[in-house]
Image (spheres, rainbow, N blue to C red):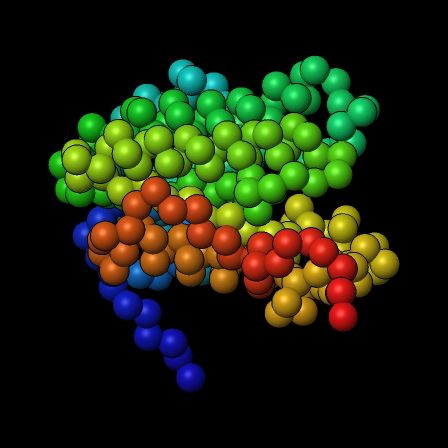
């Protein structure tokens, strides 16, 4: 049975960073299916998962969002293509790569360049154009931004900063008609999770920590992003929505009874 998608973004233009794979690609796919024209921004070429979608609704731009010079180019290219901007999804980020005690300074800085500076510079460049149509920004952070983890200091710090940046942007931009929210996924089945998923013992512990008993799918995170970017969330701004199967519902204590 063919699924009929809503047209919440028909006639609208969006930018999705980190769009070559994972949650970014799933989000781009969702927005295109719902009628948007999407600028796909990534350092890497887009994957085959997007090739069955209407080519006229997508345009690819390869650049590094961690570079401040890229922000104006991304926005300018989108406006030349579509003459408007309605949605910005900041999904590009830096993966967890090393334990805290082994982390070189360059890796520490790279987390903040991608996860914080990239969001700031691109949102700042996009904001005047989002104001014209009452646009929306969705920042993809992590449950790691809502609390601490062992051996993940840089990742926790950068994702936490992105959550607080979301709060501040929502306050500053609200009266200008721009909503800013964040989604905070836990581990999600993507290309980046494959190494973790190969470790059966670790996956068993992860599943046991998640009340729904499984890790999430990229499409599930994309659905939350699309909702926050849509008019259905017109009175929602400044939230950090966990998309985590309930993992943040607990306080980490062992069973006491």
Which residue does the image show at 45% across and 52% down from the upper left? 241
Q: Quadrant of residue 238?
A: top left
What is the number of callouts on the image?
0
Q: Position of residue 64 (x, y in %)?
A: 50, 26
Observer-nearest of 5 and 151: 151
Q: Residue furthest left?
A: 132
In the picture, the quarter occupied by the N terminus is: bottom left
In the current view of this chain or complex, which residue is farthest to the right? 201
Q: Is residue 144 left or right of residue 196?
A: left
Q: Residue furthest bottom?
A: 1
Q: Residue sitting at 59 percent across and 30 percent down?
A: 157
Q: Is residue 83 visible?
A: no
Query: Which residue is at 50% across, 62% downward?
Result: 220
User: Can you give x and y, in whole percent of width and height, for residue 131 in the image?
Assistant: 17, 35
Instruction: Give coordinates of residue 84: x percent, y percent.
Output: 19, 38
Left or right, 228 with respect to 94, comes to left
- Is 66 drawn above or below residue 226 in the view shown? above
Q: Quadrant of residue 122?
A: top left
Report whether residue 176 is seen.
Answer: yes
Q: How far across and down, in percent of the image, does residue 210 sit?
A: 66, 63
Which quadrant, please, contains the C terminus?
A: bottom right
Q: Residue at x 70, y 15 (%)?
A: 105
In the image shown, does 145 or 251 lie closer to the viewer? Answer: 251
Instruction: Give the vertical position of 152 relative to 249 (above or below).
Output: above
């Amino acid at each position: 049975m063919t699924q009929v998608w809503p047209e919440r973004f028909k006639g609208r233009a969006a930018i999705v960073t980190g769009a070559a794979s994972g949650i970014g690609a799933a989000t781009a796919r969702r927005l295109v299916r719902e009628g948007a024209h999407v600028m796909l921004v990534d350092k890497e070429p887009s994957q085959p998962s997007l090739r069955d979608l209407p080519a006229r609704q997508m345009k690819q731009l390869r650049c590094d969002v961690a570079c401040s010079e890229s922000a104006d180019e991304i926005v300018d290219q989108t406006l030349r293509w579509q003459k408007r901007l309605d949605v910005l999804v900041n999904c590009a980020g830096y993966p967890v790569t090393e334990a805290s005690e082994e982390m070189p300074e360059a890796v520490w800085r790279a987390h903040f360049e991608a996860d914080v500076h990239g969001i700031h510079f691109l949102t700042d460049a996009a904001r005047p154009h989002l104001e014209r149509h009452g646009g929306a920004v969705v920042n993809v952070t992590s449950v790691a931004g809502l609390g601490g983890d062992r051996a993940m200091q840089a990742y926790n710090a950068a994702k936490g900063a992105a959550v607080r940046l979301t709060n501040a942007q929502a306050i500053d931009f609200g009266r200008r008609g721009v909503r800013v929210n964040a989604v905070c996924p836990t581990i999600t089945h993507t290309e980046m999770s494959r190494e973790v998923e190969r470790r059966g013992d670790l996956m068993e512990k992860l599943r046991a920590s998640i009340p729904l008993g499984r890790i999430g799918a990229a499409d599930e995170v994309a659905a939350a992003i699309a909702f926050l970017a849509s008019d259905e969330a017109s009175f929602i701004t400044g939230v950090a929505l966990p998309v985590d199967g309930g993992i943040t519902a607990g306080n980490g204590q062992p069973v006491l009874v």
